[in-house]
């Protein structure tokens, strides 16, 4: 597809995946088209095109035309991305406010008689790399940065060895950025020597901020039309507040690497983000509530299928994953969900056992005792109910349950325990299990 690289990057910065951007762009050019025409025009594989068209329809970016065969038309871009543009304006307003503060400091400094007293100045592009390198190499405590993918790629090509040296010096290197399939390998490599965080904000990052040892810093635009350097703890403190606010909305790169290893793409990996996780939890809670209302029907299969349908909505590849991959995805969701944090599954396909580990403290001890008194294992965890249903469909039949409880050591939380539930399963001799 003859899609402009700048336009593709802009659409991705506004929240679309690469394939979604390609399909929306193709449909805008065609005006109205069948799915097969969209696939041909966009270059996206046909089997993915149908799913992505449905996703774009759910997001009110396109709509179907009542015709045979079915056709699709795009909705106006200005209406679709209005909210994103407003967010961008807010970001630009913050940057302009920061620049005004810096300019005031610069003007005060320019009145001083000695050049060495200046603490904010603009530097040229040729001097930037050398100045940045010398600042980083003499870092002793920490480096914090919100870095655009463009600048990160540019810097990392020449400075991986420098980051390794900082790592060996025990300098804490922290980088917040955006992630795409294209830059995953760079981020994964850097994560061996630095703390890499993926921004949960929807705004495009095209201005980078780097703070060294809480005093020296840089502010760089992607097009490098200005590069500002400062050496003032008050300015650094101002920018650290911005960095920390973004950091609170970010996730470690390790979760995204796990997602990519399971699904083999970063498409829909924003399920790990706070906003998406909240929406997923709300839909699962609603399904749980509806199941409680319909207790008289007691249809566990319907409840399990409703949970699986919700998971498939947020992760379109979910149904095509192996049972082992599904277990890993569920563990990833559990680890990022505050409600179920501390719970994990381990599937042993050889011995047909499902091991459930639960870290618990005083807040959950009452529930644990109720379960023990009942003499059976009843886990009110929707993800577990979905996994159990998947195992049942593959021919696994629940058998013996083993309950282990032991102290977790070392621990700094009084009475904190680890509970291990081992659920044995039986497989019919003739059953063919696809893992």
Image (cartoon, rainbow, N blue to C red):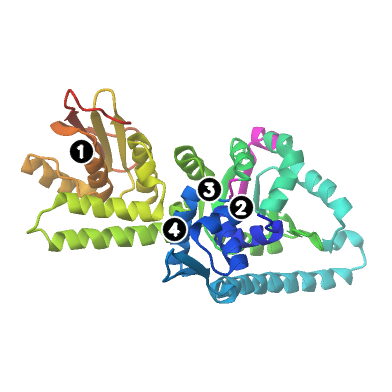
Question: Is 45 within the magenta?
Answer: no
Residue 6: image quadrant is bottom right
- Residue 370 to residue 13: above or below: above
Q: CA distance from mark 4 to mark 2?
A: 16 Å
In front: mark 3 or mark 2?
3
Span shown in magenta:
165-181
Q: Residues within 10 Å of mark 3 (few under 14, many from 20)?
A: few
- Earlier residue among tags 3 and 4: 3
Q: Secondary structure at mark 1?
A: helix
Residue 180 in picture, x, y percent from top left: 59, 49
Numbered circle sitting on residue 392 = 1
User: In front here: 18 or 239?
Assistant: 18
Name the quarter where the C terminus is drawn: top left
| Left or right side of 129 for 174 | left
| Left or right side of 112 for 275 | left
User: In front here: 51 or 187?
Assistant: 51
Residue 244 seen in the current view: no
Residue for badge 2: 177
| Left or right side of 402 for 229 | right
Residue 202 in picture, x, y percent from top left: 55, 63
Residue for badge 3: 45
């Amino acid at each position: 597809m003859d899609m402009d690289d700048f336009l593709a990057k802009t659409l991705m910065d506004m929240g679309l995946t690469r394939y979604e951007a390609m399909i929306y762009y193709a449909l805008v050019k065609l005006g109205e088209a069948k799915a097969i025409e969209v696939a041909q025009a966009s270059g996206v594989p046909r089997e993915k095109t149908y799913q992505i068209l449905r996703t774009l329809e759910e997001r009110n970016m396109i709509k179907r035309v009542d015709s045979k065969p079915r056709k699709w038309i795009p909705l106006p871009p200005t209406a679709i991305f209005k909210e994103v543009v407003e967010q961008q304006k807010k970001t630009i307003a913050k940057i302009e406010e920061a620049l005004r503060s810096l300019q005031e400091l610069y003007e005060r400094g320019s009145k001083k008689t000695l050049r060495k007293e200046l603490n904010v100045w603009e530097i040229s592009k040729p001097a930037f790399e050398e100045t940045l390198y010398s600042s980083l190499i003499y870092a002793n405590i920490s480096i914090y940065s919100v870095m655009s993918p463009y600048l990160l790629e540019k810097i990392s090509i020449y400075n991986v060895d420098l980051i390794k040296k900082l790592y060996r010096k025990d300098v804490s290197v922290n980088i917040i950025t955006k992630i795409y399939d294209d830059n995953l390998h760079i981020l994964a490599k850097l994560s061996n020597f630095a703390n890499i965080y993926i921004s949960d904000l929807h705004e495009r990052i095209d201005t980078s901020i780097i703070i060294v040892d809480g005093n020296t810093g840089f502010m760089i635009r992607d097009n490098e039309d200005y590069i500002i350097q400062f050496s003032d703890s008050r300015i650094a403190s101002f920018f650290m507040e911005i960095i920390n606010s973004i950091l609170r909305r970010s996730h470690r790169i390790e979760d995204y690497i796990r997602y990519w290893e399971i699904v083999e793409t970063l498409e829909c990996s924003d399920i790990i983000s706070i906003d998406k996780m909240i929406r997923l939890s709300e839909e699962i809670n609603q399904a749980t509530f509806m199941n409680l209302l319909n207790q008289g029907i007691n249809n566990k299969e319907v409840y399990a299928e409703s949970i699986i349908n919700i998971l498939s909505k947020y992760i379109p590849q979910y149904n095509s994953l192996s049972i082992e991959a599904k277990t890993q995805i569920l563990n990833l969701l559990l680890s990022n969900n505050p409600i179920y944090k501390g719970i994990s599954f381990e599937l042993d396909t050889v011995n047909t056992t499902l091991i459930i580990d639960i870290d618990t403290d005083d807040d959950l001890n009452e529930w644990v005792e109720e379960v023990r008194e009942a003499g059976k294992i009843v886990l009110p965890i929707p993800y577990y109910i979905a996994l159990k249903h998947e195992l049942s469909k593959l021919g696994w039949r629940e058998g013996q349950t083993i309950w282990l409880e032991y102290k977790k050591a070392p621990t700094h939380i009084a009475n904190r325990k680890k509970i291990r539930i081992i659920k044995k399963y039986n497989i019919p001799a003739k059953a063919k299990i696809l893992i």
